[in-house]
Amino acid sequence: MREWLANPRKSKGLTHQQVADKVGIKRQYYGMIESGERTPSVTTAKRISEVLDLDWTIFFESKSNKMFLSQKQAI
């Protein structure tokens, strides 16, 4: 789960449905993004970031960090 995404949503008192509606995506898709199952497009990341007051690049930095760590552990 992406706590860095869930925590701001919860602190704003928003549900998955409310964020999805504001962003223009389906609730199920937003849930997959928040759980880490999916990475949004740049456009969607920017929209989510506007709603939750986040830096949109964190969606991609987090994935890169996970890939780096898994590659490092494999060595």
Image (tube, grey):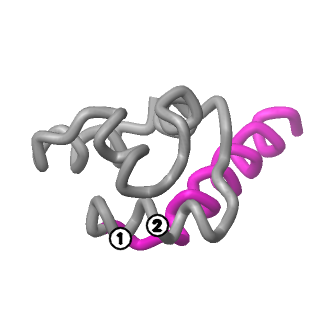
**Viewer-closest of 45 and 2:** 45
What label sits on residue 50 in the rendered view? 1
The magenta stretch spans residue 46: no
User: For this view, does 70 lie left or right of residue 55?
Assistant: right
Return the residue nearer the eye: 56 or 65: 56
Location of residue 53 in the rendering, given as x and y in whole percent from the top left corner: 27, 68
Residue 55: x and y, percent?
41, 72
**Type of amino acid under label 1:** Glu
Number of residues whose C-alpha sits closer than 10 Å to that of mark 2, classed few (under 14), some (14–19) or many (20 or more): many
> As rendered, which of 56 and 26 lies closer to the eye?
26
- The answer to whether residue 29 is above or below residue 25 is above
For image coordinates 24% across by 45% down, the residue present is 9
Q: Magenta region: which residues?
A: 54-75
Report, in whole angstroms, how far the alpha carbon at label 2 lies from the one at label 1.
5 Å
Q: Is residue 43 left or right of residue 6?
A: right
Quadrant (top left, top right, bottom left, bottom right) of the C terminus: top right
Q: Quadrant of residue 54?
A: bottom left
Q: Is residue 52 above or below residue 75?
A: below
**Label 1: how many residues lie within 10 Å, few (<14), some (14-19) or many (20+)?**
some
- Magenta region, mostly helix, strand or loop? helix
Q: Dot 2 lies on which element?
A: helix
Say which residue label 2 marks.
47
Q: Amino acid at mark 2?
A: Arg
Q: Position of residue 22 (x, y in %)?
A: 36, 55
Q: Is residue 67 left or right of residue 60?
A: right
Q: How many numbered circles does the render carry?
A: 2
